[in-house]
Amino acid sequence: MFALLHPAALLALTGLLVPVAIHLWNRRPAREVAVGSLRWLAAGANRRLRNLKLEQLWLLLLRAALLAVLAVAVAGPVWRTARPISRGVVLLSAEAARLPTLAGIKPTIDSLRRKGYALRWLSAGFPRVPGAAWRAVAAGRASAAVDSAAARQPSGPAWARVQQAAATFAGQPVFVVTSAALRDFGGRHAPLPAAVSWQALPDTTTSAWLAAAGLVGDSLHLLVGHSNEARTTYRPQRSLLPPTGQIVRLAGLAPLRLQPDTTGSGSLRLVPANGATSASTPAIEVRKSPLTIDLYATPEYTADARYWEAAVRAAAVGLPVALQLRRVTDRPRQLQADWTCWLSDEALPQNWQQTVREGATIWQEAAGPGVPDTASFAAADASGSAGLVFRRGARPPALGSATVWADGRGRPVLSRRMLGRGATYQLHTRLAPPWSELADDPQMPARLLKLLQPAAPDEAAAVLYHPRNPGLEQQLSRFDHRALDPAQLTSAPRMQPTAAPIRAAGERTTDLRPWLVLTAGLLFLLERWLAGRRAGSTLPTSI
């Protein structure tokens, strides 16, 4: 349908009178020279000059058409067509497209597509999944399809992306297919509309990796991580220190080679034997010094200090180096340990910031009476769930903090603020009852172990272990295969097909002004060519 954005601009069509007036009045009076009997024809010539008539009709039409096209272009012409919507949307994440368990949900997706549902990627902009890409995914050849530009766009936390999709496709049923991996469900879990159905596919694959290495005497202490759908565990292994350059073989892992650090610091590293360091086979520094922790607690935190010390000693079983935990009774003036547990309502000393920038880590807990909260701790299974979490609103997460542990609604239980190569951890509850039941959580030592591992300091490992994200948290983003409890999703998948005809939702508008400007340019060139041709064919005459 043709429409004008500015109809009043059509008043510019009155400019068509200009070329008509030029053609009617562009009659220059001839110079009269009385020669013989021609002087008797002067009266008749004057009468003929009074009879106005059009000349060079094609040139007049070209000029009028040029002005008309420009006038219509100023009026803002557009072409509007009705844009139909689909009966629903199927959103497929790139992670789910790679899973073998997608075969179980494929008939459902095909059925929805036949009913008019549009298949889109769960990524920025929600681009459509081409038919060829879906056939490749359904046939088990997801690599080429998922690696396309549309699927490679960062998807971000799944919950936030689905919430955005619900607003984008308002009024339509949305069927979401994602991986059930716990790592994809970070952030705040705001309520979703009832039109959203969610199918989380389990990841049945497992992973094993070398998490850390340490040198104690002449023994090489290794920490090997294993992750599957149910849990993530770490198993310590010991062996004699092999000679430099020797191959180290561990069950379930690719061969590793022991080599000196290239920075000349005298430290050792375990690198892949084939020399191809990648995200799946990172280089690990062999730590030689023990992990030192200073614990300072004021009297009101006595119980919390006892629970924190017990949890750290339980986590230290998995450390590849020895643990030196010291109870500090006097307020420390300087940070002299790798970790400092600050259990006090007092503010942190300002002069500690520089030490944190150099790699130190501080742990703090909540203060005050606390506010009861019914949200439970987010965990992969029932065995790792904690009870009530008590919060304190007077000490919110610091600006620039990232959530490390979250509750079932995505709110932070433990946040981390990076400062240089170090960090400050803020626990928004306490370990001691009745604040929480975290101390009784069997997964608590494993969670602390992920935080206690130091970052690799050398430049080669900095590519894999970002200095602003130290410890095993970086590794878990790649190796963690734990699945989210389906009960934490909105509900079971609900199919909402409809037999109603596809209705129009809005209009698609095409701007015609660029085409009119191009037409005006062509008419102008044609007018100049025709005007020059007429001028060249008119020869001057003399009497």
Image: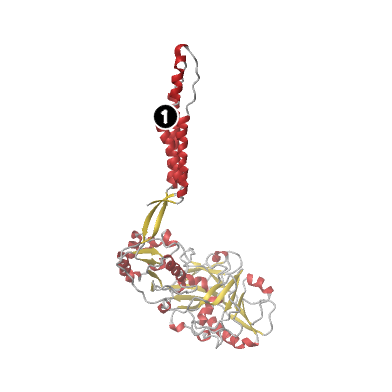
Q: Is residue 325 above or below residue 53?
A: below
70 vs 249: above or below: above
Percent across and percent down for residue 21 are 46, 33
Report the residue marked by disc 1.
53
Viewed as shown, does residue 399 lie left or right of 71? Answer: right
Q: Residue placed at 35% from the left, 74% from the top?
A: 494
Q: Nearer the viewer, residue 255 or 69?
A: 69
Q: Position of residue 273 (x, y in %)?
A: 48, 66
Crowding at dot 1, Cα within 10 Å, few <14 / some 14-19 / many 20+, comes out as: few
Amino acid under disc 1: Lys
Residue 480, image x, y percentages: 46, 73
Q: Quadrant of residue 90?
A: bottom left
In the picture shown, does residue 56 fall above or below 310?
A: above
Local secondary structure at mark 1: loop
Image position of 96 (left or right of 401): left
Most foreground residue, 537 or 396? 537
> To which quarter of the image does residue 484 belong?
bottom left
**In the image shown, does 500 or 155 lie closer to the viewer?**
500
> Residue 465 versus residue 356: which sits nearer the camera?
356
